[in-house]
Image (cartoon, rainbow, N blue to C red):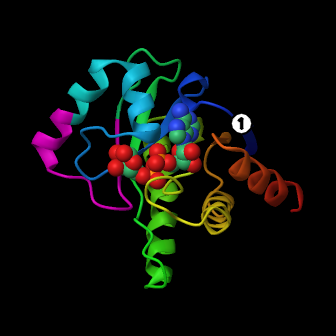
Amino acid sequence: MKIKVLKGDITTVQVDAIVNAANSSLLGGSGVDGAIHKAGGSTILEACRQIRNKQGKCNVGEAVITTGGNLPAKKVIHTVGPVYQKGKNNEKEKELLTNCYENSILLAKENDLQSIAFPCISTGIYRFPKQVAAEVAISAIKNNPILNEVVFVCFDDENYEIYKELLNNE
Ligand code: AR6
């Protein structure tokens, strides 16, 4: 398994699947979610609506898969990260964030996809501390080397520096 880190916009990355940091409604939002729906077009939202009609909301830590619409990626895997509550039950939140990464790669594998790109799930609107979130993300991926390629796509400098440091020092 190759692990890479990139700085930039995940909607431009050419991999089999990109991951969306969605919310439980699956019906879009701001941040990376907004960027993916905007760049990928309405077929992604339509596919999310169909999933909603079938299974209801997507729980925190779980993942669903849709078309990639107009994106260079074939598929989008939508996962719902935990909201970080400062000073409260953070072990549970780390476990839920681990589940996001694990369930996303399992879903990719089930769909015969070999490369995946992740945003830094929960580190925006959901306020997860970036260093801890990066450690959780990298461990979850290294503990489950089931795909050929995993790309961490960092949008901001702080996340990019954290990932570079953690990946180079191992
Ligand atoms: N490419 C890659 N990363 C991005 C991009 C992009 N185009 N845009 C933002 N990021 P956030 P969350 C980074 O807030 O914290 C949505 O409204 C951003 O810098 O997108 O999981 C959903 O609908 C940050 O590091 O997701 C939910 O309601 C990371 O993506 C809620 O936000 C995650 O930030 C989810 O919150």
Q: Secondary structure at mark 1?
A: strand
**Residue 167 in sight from this viewpoint:** yes
Tell me which corner region of the image, top left, top right, bottom left or bottom right, holds residue 77: top left
Percent coordinates x, y for residue 124 in the rendering:
50, 52
Could you tell me which residue is drawn at 19 percent across and 52 percent down? 57
Residue to which mark 1 is pinned? 7
Could you tell me which residue is drawn at 43 percent across and 20 percent down? 39
Q: Nearer the viewer, residue 117 or 89?
A: 89
Residue 71 lies left or right of residue 30; in this view the side is: right
Percent coordinates x, y for residue 123 in the rendering:
54, 56
**Residue 22 in sight from this viewpoint:** no
Percent coordinates x, y for residue 157 in the rendering:
73, 45
Which amino acid, mark 1? Lys
Q: Residues within 10 Å of mark 1 (few under 14, many from 20)?
A: some
Q: Which residues are magenta?
A: 49-65
Quarter occupied by the C terminus: bottom right
Could you tell me which residue is drawn at 16 percent across and 33 percent down? 50
Percent coordinates x, y for residue 34 in the rendering:
39, 33
Residue 151 lies left or right of residue 28; in this view the side is: right
Q: Nearer the viewer, residue 87 or 59?
A: 87
